Image (cartoon, rainbow, N blue to C red):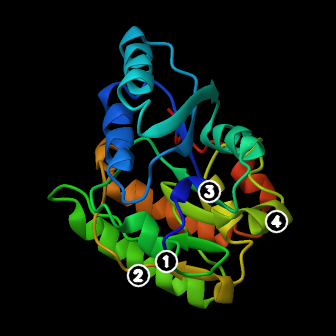
């Protein structure tokens, strides 16, 4: 694919007081092949001076490689929704601020696959790497049972499909990524097995591995219960 990414892709990053993390996220985006000029919306609600300074630094340091705009944010579902409403490209990538695309071929490779929703495997620091391999298993089981699951950290949507299923529900406070990805048919979903998508284990450290697995399974059994996703279930505590 030789088409510049700026002509087909918009990237949306929800952010709140991410400090240096959001800078490193954008730094790795800027290293992606064929990325020059691509629109990046950072949907931010930061209140800390350090984070606000990094946002200003991002707009300065990457102004020649990316088309960056900081917009109003909120909870992740809100920030993603706000950014999507401004997107004018055939594809939208929802990327979390703590996701680093360390392989420069990830976006080009994913866009080769004509699916409505695409995601990738994640890796993290030891001793938590095995957790994501267990998640891969859960993701496979859920997908084969007719409920695709793409973590909100990396969701590459066909924009028409995103709009058709109603987009992100701005009122959802928990597992909003599971809620929206489950609306895509299995045949229109793909996990591209490419290495190089890193994320911090900070949520495992703060909430605990057992709690994360418990709430993931609970989300699966409530996948047809819209009210379940409207409560935070202590995730943001």
Residue at numbered disc 3:
7
Residue topped by disc 2: 137
Quick one: SS at disc 4?
Answer: loop
Q: Which mark is residue 236?
A: none
User: From this viewpoint, which residue is outermost toward the top?
Assistant: 49
Q: Nearer the viewer, mark 4 or mark 2?
A: 4
Along the horizontal axis of the image, is 48 left or right of 196? right
Query: Marks 3 and 4, Cα distance to the nearest angstrom?
Result: 23 Å
Q: Nearer the viewer, residue 157 or 64?
A: 64
**Residue shown at the point (69%, 56%) measured from the top left:** 89
Nearer to the camera, 2 or 223: 2
Q: From the viewer's side, name the closer residue of 131 and 119.
A: 119
Q: Are marks 2 and 1 in contact (CB under 8 Å)?
A: yes
**Looking at the picture, how far across and down is residue 150, in whole percent?**
55, 67
> Is residue 212 visible from the viewing direction of this image?
yes
**Mark 3 or mark 2: which comes first in sequence?**
3
Q: Which mark is residue 139?
A: 1
The residue at which mark 4 appears reads as 165
């Amino acid at each position: 694919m030789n088409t510049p990414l700026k002509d087909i892709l918009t990237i949306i990053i929800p952010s709140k007081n991410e400090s240096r993390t959001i800078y490193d996220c954008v730094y790795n985006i800027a290293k992606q092949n064929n990325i020059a000029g691509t629109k990046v919306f950072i949907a931010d609600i930061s209140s800390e001076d350090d984070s606000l300074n990094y946002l200003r630094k991002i707009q300065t340091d990457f102004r020649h490689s990316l088309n960056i705009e900081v917009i109003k944010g909120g909870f992740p579902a809100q920030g993603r929704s706000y950014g999507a409403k401004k997107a004018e490209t055939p594809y939208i990538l929802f990327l979390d601020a703590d996701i680093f695309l360390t392989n420069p071929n990830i976006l080009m490779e994913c866009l080769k696959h004509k699916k409505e929703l695409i995601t990738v495997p994640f890796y993290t620091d030891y001793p938590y790497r095995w957790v994501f391999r267990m998640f891969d298993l859960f993701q496979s089981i859920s997908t084969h049972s007719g409920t695709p699951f793409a973590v909100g950290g990396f969701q590459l949507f066909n924009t028409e499909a995103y709009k058709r299923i109603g987009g992100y529900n701005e009122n959802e406070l928990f597992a909003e990524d599971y809620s929206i990805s489950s609306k895509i048919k299995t045949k229109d979903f793909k996990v591209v097995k490419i290495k190089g998508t890193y994320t911090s284990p900070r949520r495992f450290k703060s909430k605990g591995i057992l709690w994360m697995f418990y709430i993931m399974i609970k989300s699966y059994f409530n996948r047809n219960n819209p009210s379940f996703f409207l409560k935070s279930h202590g995730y943001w505590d």
